[in-house]
Image (tube, rainbow, N blue to C red):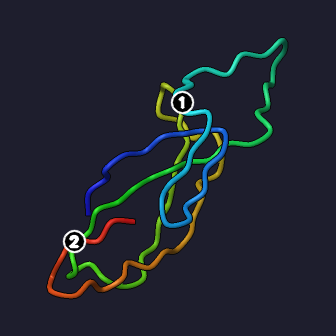
Amino acid sequence: MNVDFAFVCDYAEATGKLNALGIGFETIIGKQLPVRHPHFCLVIQLRTSTVEAGEKNIKVFLIDADGKEVIKPLEGKFNIPKTPGGLESVG
């Protein structure tokens, strides 16, 4: 499994093709601390082979510059479909 790309943006949806808004920020500026961003999306596109088909677990960590966790890890599951003819799958 390889990561084709990953980014944070203001909004994203995948309906046949990926649509994302607000790509490219790396800093959130606020007048006081703590700073809260009301909503953002983490977008990751994976490229897999047919032998990797099936349900997979994922865990995403948000860490600071010192490698310490900022928030509790986000956990979930996703399914890699079995593609015909041993082709790669993108999702």
Q: Pointer 2 and pointer 1: residues touching (CB < 8 Å)?
A: no
On screen, 41 above or below 75?
above
The residue positioned 44% from the left and 53% from the top of the image is 44
Q: Mark 2, residues whose alpha carbon is within 10 Å: few (<14), some, or many (≥20)? A: some
Residue 64, numbered label: 1
Tell me residue 35's x, y (percent).
78, 25
The residue positioned 57% from the left and 41% from the top of the image is 69
Residue at mark 2: 88
Position of 72 compared to 52: left or right?
right
**Nearer to me, 34 or 79:** 79
Tell me residue 52's x, y (percent).
26, 78
Farthest residue, direction left: 85
**Nearer to me, 65 or 90:** 90
On screen, 35 above or below 10?
above
Which element carries disc 1, helix, strand or loop? Answer: loop
State how far apart marks 2 and 1 are (Cα).
34 Å
Farthest residue, direction top: 31
Tell me residue 84's x, y (percent).
22, 88
The residue positioned 31% from the left and 53% from the top of the image is 3
Farthest residue, direction right: 32
Position of 20 compared to 28: left or right?
left
Q: For residue 71, which quarter of the picture? A: top right
Tell me residue 72's x, y (percent).
64, 51
**Tag 2: amino acid:** Glu
**Tag 1: amino acid:** Asp
Q: Mark 1, residues whose alpha carbon is within 10 Å: few (<14), some, or many (≥20)? A: few
**Nearer to me, 74 or 29:** 29
Q: How many marks?
A: 2
Residue 36, numbered label: none
- Quadrant housing the N terminus: bottom left
Q: For residue 28, which quarter of the picture? A: top right
Q: Nearer the viewer, mark 2 or mark 1?
A: 2
